Amino acid sequence: MNNSNIDKFEILSRLAKAGSSGKDLREVSDSALSLAAEYVGLTAAALHLWNEKNELILSVDHAKADSARKRLAGLENDLFRSLRNNSGLSSAYMSFDGQPPTHAFTLPLKFRGRTFGALIGLQEGEKTVVAEDDLLESLTSLLALNFAVDNYGQDSVATEELVSKGRREAIVETAVTVNHEINNPLTAILGNIQLLLLKGDELDPSLVQKLRVVEQSALKIRDVTQRLLKLTTPKSVTYTDGTNMIDLSDGKDEGSE
């Protein structure tokens, strides 16, 4: 597995589906660590959960070699845990000199204002793990959501709020990526079409009409991506094959346009 055949949104989607299917938290966490480690390029990653007495209740890890696993465990035992307990550390990214250089991080898992776990990782090489902090933070949010559902499932109001929050965060991340990946080439397409239309008198009328159709379609795509970015209260509608899709309608009757 590598970046060419899986992306961050597929990782988050798989994690969300695994949690909603009722899979065991250890199994979900182990799968999440494995996928994220491959995507980000981590040499080692670990998830630690503890109860209200700070007693460890779950620990899973993923490492390319025992040496990386031991180094990450040493950072947790000698540095991260001490800073959490004594100085209120929540999250941290740090780099260490060496050949190759090493980067490490710790991110919290939180529920109802209480930190009940941490995702930690180790990366070797020039690429810094900070470049994927959005994925890692989304990963901890979904793991926290899975923990909450697993442990507070009877609290339907709290669980529903957490599910809604997690869904909104995932939609926002998707929207930002869509705007970046689609609007850049879309701007080039619109610019070239509009330049051609400025020479409309020199073009065949049928070609001008086709260019205007393409222009209107491109403008509609831009409008949809903007609506996705501004979406605050997502709701679903049923697609033709029975699956759900996000409702991005603007409330207008498209037949009247």
Image (cartoon, grey):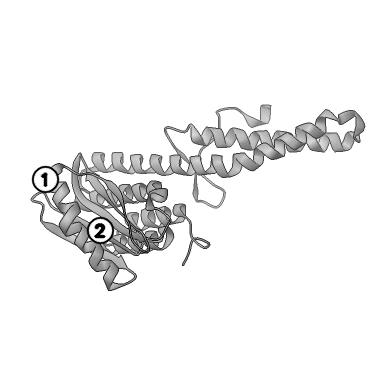
Return the disc, 1 or 2, that comes first in the chain's sequence: 2
Residue 170 x, y percent position in the rendering: 41, 44
Circle 1 crowding by C-alpha within 10 Å: few under 14, some 14–19, many from 20: few
Q: Nearer the viewer, residue 24 or 36?
A: 36
Residue 250 x, y percent position in the rendering: 55, 29
The residue where tag 1 is placed is 86
Q: Nearer the viewer, residue 58 or 187?
A: 187
Tell me the SS state at disc 2. strand
Quadrant hosting residue 194: top right
Quadrant hosting residue 23: bottom left
Q: CA distance from mark 1 to mark 2?
A: 20 Å
Q: Which quadrant would the C terminus be assigned to in this image?
A: top right
**Image side of residue 128 versus residue 72, left or right:** right
Amino acid under disc 2: Leu
**Can you say whether 159 is above or below 26 in the image?**
above
Closer to the eye: label 1 or 2? 1
**Image side of residue 113 versus residue 220, left or right:** left
The residue where tag 2 is placed is 47
Q: Which mark is residue 194?
A: none
Tell me which residue sits at (27%, 72%) in the image: 66
**Can you say whether 98 is above or below 197 in the image?**
below
* Whether residue 73 can be seen here: yes
Amino acid under disc 1: Asn
